Amino acid sequence: MLRIITSNLNGIRSAQKKGFFEWMLQSEADIVCVQELKAQEDDLTPEMRNPGKYRGCFHPAEKKGYSGVGIYSLREPDNLVEGLGIADIDSEGRYLQADYGNLSVISLYLPSGSSSEERQQVKFHFLEKFLPHLRDLKTSGREVVICGDWNIAHREIDLKNWKGNLKNSGFLPEERAWMTHVFDAVGWVDVYRKLHPEATGEAYTWWSNRGQARANNVGWRIDYQIATPGFADTAKHAYVYREQRFSDHAPLVMDYML
């Protein structure tokens, strides 16, 4: 079995204080992908870099206290790829790929467009530039799983208040159509949906900090593990871990039987 977890930390230092690493060390995960580090390499303590038996690798943003992704694994990767080779995207620390044999595991943090129209255009730019890379990965001959915060709820069952969010970033028709293209045309598989095709509230991975969104489970499913078909076929178990709160997101746990 190979257990892979993805979790947006909304600040690695904040998540550490809330017990994320203690939980991670007991999670029996082989690989843990994290997003939104909000930290530079120099900010990471030894516990954050290499907690317990895990070895960490990171791709922080150039801007302090912003974005950044990382991957923890029991086994040291054979190869690392930091960024997409696109300067304006890579400066925000949004893509890290670790290769283990014929399997590539990617930690991805797709931009949010909710703060301004300008940031929404940055998000659309990312989607446009990322799609050819998704096609290349799909036809590379490798098994690949892309773990992370995609900042898009794909279908109506992926968020509580879908009618009220039809014109909001994260549920825009263009964003949802892009995700549909990734699955239906390019051929990637939404692994959680493969295992739980009709799941609603138990599938949510993010809740607004405003009001009582988490208490009332007014959430969104925006954290995914999206895989090549061959690897997706090995997935046997998936769930969202909610017993402890490490950030405004919850970890998504997947077991693959290789």
Image: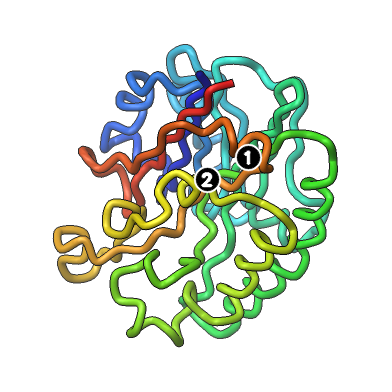
Q: Quadrant of the C terminus?
A: top right
Question: What is the quadrant of residue 230 in the picture?
Answer: top right
Q: Are marks 1 and 2 in contact (CB under 8 Å)?
A: yes
Which of labels 1 and 2 is toward the front? 2
Crowding at label 1, few (<14), some or many (≥20) Cα neighbours within 10 Å? many
Question: What is the quadrant of residue 111 in the picture?
Answer: bottom right
Location of mark 2 (residue): 191
For label 1, the SS is strand
In this rendering, position of residue 95 left or right of residue 43: right
Q: Mark 1: which amino acid? A: Val
In the rendered view, would you say 116 is above or below 126?
A: below
In the rendered view, would you say 139 is above or below 30?
A: below
Task: Say if residue 211 shows up in the picture.
Answer: yes
Location of mark 1 (residue): 145
First reached walking from the N terminus: tag 1 or tag 2 = 1
In the rendered view, would you say 30 is above or below 111?
A: above
In this rendering, position of residue 243 left or right of residue 24: left
Q: Alpha-carbon distance for marks 1 and 2?
A: 9 Å
- The structure residue drawn at horizontal position 44% and vertical position 82%, both measured from the top left corner, is 168
